[in-house]
Image (tube, grey):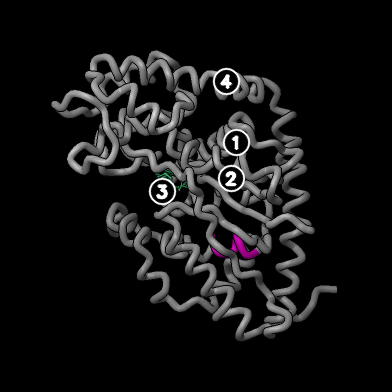
Amino acid sequence: MARPRVLSGVQPTGALHLGNWLGAIRNWVGLQDSHDTFFCVVDLHAITVPHDPARLAEDTLTTAALYLACGIDPQRSTVFVQSHVAAHSELCWLLNCVTPLNWLERMIQFKEKAVKQGDNVSAGLLDYPVLMAADILLYDADLVPVGEDQKQHLELARDIAQQRINSRFGSEEAPLLRVPEPLILQDGARVMSLTDGRSKMSKSDPNEGSRITLLDPPELVTRKIKRAKTDPTMGLEFGNPERPEADNLLGLYAVLSGLGREAATAQCASMGWGTFKPLLAETVVEALRPVQERYRDLRSDPSQLQQVLELGRERAEAVASTTLQRLRDALGFYPRS
Ligand code: AQP
């Protein structure tokens, strides 16, 4: 029986951080044996906000190398760069033309990010969820791992596939697009900012001290944790709404030490911040060490990474071109000879 297909990706908008790892990539690694996994670096999404052309290619390679360094295996997964498969842009256009504008205007992420852009907000930012729908629908993905922040976008992809394509241009017996389901991961850790336990750790936070990136050297990790926001209460605990920083940092310790929440709570319940922070710093440094070593190996041989991405592009294109052709035919385009 065919394994369910999963698709996901991260934007190359800067160095990946602990949130991207623990909330996304680490979970992808565990899916590789049981699912048919497609992981792309979503560089077309990265230009929906102002970007630096001098950094995009480098950030794309860094992101791909980090996927592999974190345990994505190109033999078992299809790893590719979104813009290398032109079908993403073409399907996005086809879907744009059937997606009501007001579906996009009510997307929470658009509203939040648009505020930050002021008058310069691009049509691309509004269109972000349609491109994401194209990414998913091109590969007939059965499942999409989603965090809380992406649930609304997946719902939109489902509505476009079902209400705007399948029911208008397909038939019940032969749907044109597979309607994907969310894959809610038990272990979907949400990592919060080091400087504000109520907002998520994010690549685009202007304060670099708010996040630990996967490539931060040990001294920097230690410094960032030392400066991380704390509170005056003694002892670490989970679930106290008055203490989001304690919850977040104890959560990081529980996951990265491998102890789990119960044992981590037992160990740290009466520990002061002055004892806890060096312990957490050492744990983070040790957890990152093998990732950083594998990353350095991968970057020392550019041809290896290039080969992985080329193989990924071929595999991805084979699937994507079939879906796209199905759509072109159903929408009535004059066929190319
Ligand atoms: N803080 C987080 N905790 C848990 N998971 C997180 N993810 C991101 N931040 C956290 C997950 O990482 C995946 C890829 O994210 P993305 O780069 O496509 O976009 P994002 O969610 O917008 O991530 P950032 O870091 O906040 O990027 P910017 O600042 O560029 O917008 C997703 O699965 C996401 O849930």
CA–CA distance in space, label 3 to label 1: 24 Å
The answer to whether the beta carbon of the residue marked 3 is less than 8 Å from any atom of ligand 1 is no
Name the mark nearer the viewer: 4 or 1. Answer: 4
SS assignment at label 1: helix
Q: Residue at x 48, y 69 (%)?
A: 156
Q: Amino acid at mark 3?
A: Pro
The N terminus - image quarter: bottom right
Q: Amino acid at mark 1?
A: Tyr
Which of the 4 image quarters holds residue 33? Answer: top right
Is label 3 in contact with label 1 (beta carbons under 8 Å)? no
Name the mark nearer the viewer: 3 or 1. Answer: 1
Percent of width and height locating residue 317: 74, 55
The C terminus - image quarter: bottom right
Ligand 1 shown in quarter: top left
Q: Residues within 10 Å of mark 3 (few under 14, many from 20)?
A: few
Q: Main secondary structure of the magenta part?
A: helix
CA–CA distance in space, label 1 to label 2: 9 Å
Is label 1 in contact with label 2 (beta carbons under 8 Å)? yes
- Viewer-side residue, 236 vs 10: 236
Instruction: Give residue 41's mark.
Output: 2
Instruction: Give residue 290's mark.
Output: 4
Q: Total of numbered circles in the picture?
A: 4
Name the mark nearer the viewer: 4 or 3. Answer: 4
Q: Residues within 10 Å of mark 2 (few under 14, many from 20)?
A: many
Q: Which residue is mark 3?
A: 50
